[in-house]
Structure formats: C-alpha cells, structure tokens
Amino acid sequence: MTIPDTSPLDAAAPAATTPGTEAAAVVRGTAPAGTNTTGGSPQGSNARRRSGRRAPARRTLTYAVLVVGVSATLLPFVWMFLGAFKTQGELLRRPITWWPEQPTLENFSSWFNELQIGTFFLNSVVVAVFTVLGNLLFCSMVGYALAKMDFPGKRFLFLLVMVMLMVPGVVTFVPLFVMVSKLGLVSTYPALILPFLAAPMGVFLMRQFIMGIPDSLIEAARIDGAGELRTFLRIVMPLCGPPLATLGILTFLGSWNNFLWPLVVAQSEEMYTLPVALSLYSTGQNATDYGLLLAGSVLIITPIILLFVALQRYFIQGVAATGIK
C-alpha cells in the first residue's frame, strides 16, 4: 500500500502562485477571472474602474469636437455647391434657403456657352502642369546639392533659402513685373510660369527628405563610378516618391489658385486663368452675379478635389516623412 505524500488538507488548499507566474499569465491573457492584476491593491482596482468610466466620456467628447470641426469646415462648400443651382433672386432672398427651390443649370450653362471657360481651363492646366514639372526638377536638384554635396557657400545658400521662406511673395511682384515687361513676355505663358519654376518651400522639403537617405548609398554609387547627375537620377530620385508627390500637390494647388500674378501679367482675355476669369466675369460694375460666382467656384475646385483624392496616400506619406506641419 502506497501512502500519499500530501494530506487531504494540503490537496484542498489553492495552489500557490508566485508573482512571476501571475505576471506571465496576465501578459498571456490567461489570468483566471478575479485575479488582481495590479498586485492585489484595492487602490489600483478603484483607479482602473475610474479610468474605465472616464474613457467613454473622453471618447464621446473627442467625437463631438471632431463633428463640430468637420461640419464647420464643410458648411461653406455645401452652401457653395447648393447655391450654384439657385437663381440670383433666390440667393438674395431673406431668410435664406438651403435647398434650391427651383434648381437651375443656367449658371453652369453661362460658363460653357457665353464665356470661354475652355480657354481659361486650358490656360490654368498649362500653367499648373509646367509649374509642377519645374518645381519637381529644380527643387529636387537643389535639395540634393544642399543635402549630399560639399561645396563652398553651402551653409550660406541654405540660410538664403530659409530667409526666402519668410519673405512674402507680394514683395517681389514689382521687380518681377519690370523684368517680365522688359523681356517682352507680358500676356504670355512664360510670364505666368517662369517666376514660379522653383520655390524655397520645395527646396526645403526635398532637402529634408534627401538628408534621410544613407550617405553610404550615395558613396557606393560614387565608388562604382557614377557621376553626380547619374547618382541623382538613378539612386536618389527613385527613393523620393512621397516628397515629390507632396511637392507636386502643393505646387499644383498654389498655381491653380494663384490669382494676383495672372491678374497683373495676363492683360488679354486669351491668357486669363480660371481665378482671373471668375473674378472679372462674376463681378460686374453694379452687382455681383452670385450664381455665376458659385458655379465657377465649383468648376475650379473640382479638379483639385479629384487630384487630392487620387494622390492623398502619397501626400500623407510625404508629409509624415519630411515632418511638415
């Protein structure tokens, strides 16, 4: 007959657990129900319950603030879109009406039939596309030189770029117009494009991203006999997709919405861009045609929204990679 090593009282007693064993069970998520995971402290359990009660209230408050912010942001766009289908009398009526009582396409037909919106649209597209291409090329080249090349005056040149970031663009309008006028470029595409082929903001963005590329990669290409241009085109540029997309979107937005410079330089109707045409044709000498203004605004922002929706993933990646806020 075999005598058990443990007495019945010992067998009925709960198994002793060491602190390490209990902690491991908590990490694995296999801790038994009722186990105090805070070391058995009643104060810890109370604090966890209070934190659990505050979490839903905090989340609800966050959602409420976000809903209010999104609504305030979208409200002008909703008003603009609905107003484009209203008559002038309904737009001026008080109290205002949100939904068009008598929807009409007359405002849009005026742009397509009476005004040369095709010419204005083509001018905006040509100016925006060439401005974007120029910025992608020149800003990335300057950014690469400032980030990975050593030459005299490098720090001074970067300091000059940073100073130019703080100078308002309107300050340079008069000297730029004098230069364009002396070159005989008034009311031409070069006058609308050349002054914006490179921007200090683009140079700064590209420099910040290219600095993150390992120096060993650049040195390996140089050791293999690649020149600076080949290293830039074959090694650096393929890695710069997100910042190039970000720079392209920002440049396109700036060129597409640019109003003051085309208003000064484009002195003939054939060279008007969409913002200039929107301002000149919707605002008469005696009254503003609000329906025409809202319909033109819808036509202008539609390409921008489509572009952002198509490239938003690259835009967010570029902003995250370069730390721009």
Image: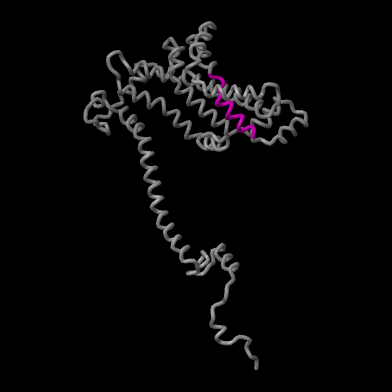
Drawn side of residue 278 relative to residue 287, left or right: right
Q: Position of residue 224 (x, y in %)?
A: 77, 31
The residue at the far left in this view is 94
Q: Quadrant of residue 281?
A: top left
Q: Is residue 299 left or right of residue 85?
A: right
Residue visible at 43% across and 10% down in the picture: 268
Report which quarter residue 153 is drawn in: top right
Find out whether residue 205 is within the magenta segment.
yes
In the displayed structure, 301 sits above or below 192; it is: below
Where residue 218 sits, quadrant-wise, is top right
Q: Residue at x 30, y 28 (%)?
A: 85
Colouring scheme applied when the structure was drawn: one colour
Front position in the image: 9 or 271? 9
Tell me residue 9's x, y (percent).
Answer: 55, 85
Residue 253 is situated, as x and y percent measured from the top left of the image, at 48, 26
Q: Nearer the viewer, residue 243 or 60?
A: 60
Residue bounds of the magenta highlight: 196-211
- Examine the rendered structure and indicate whether residue 103 appears above or below residue 269: below
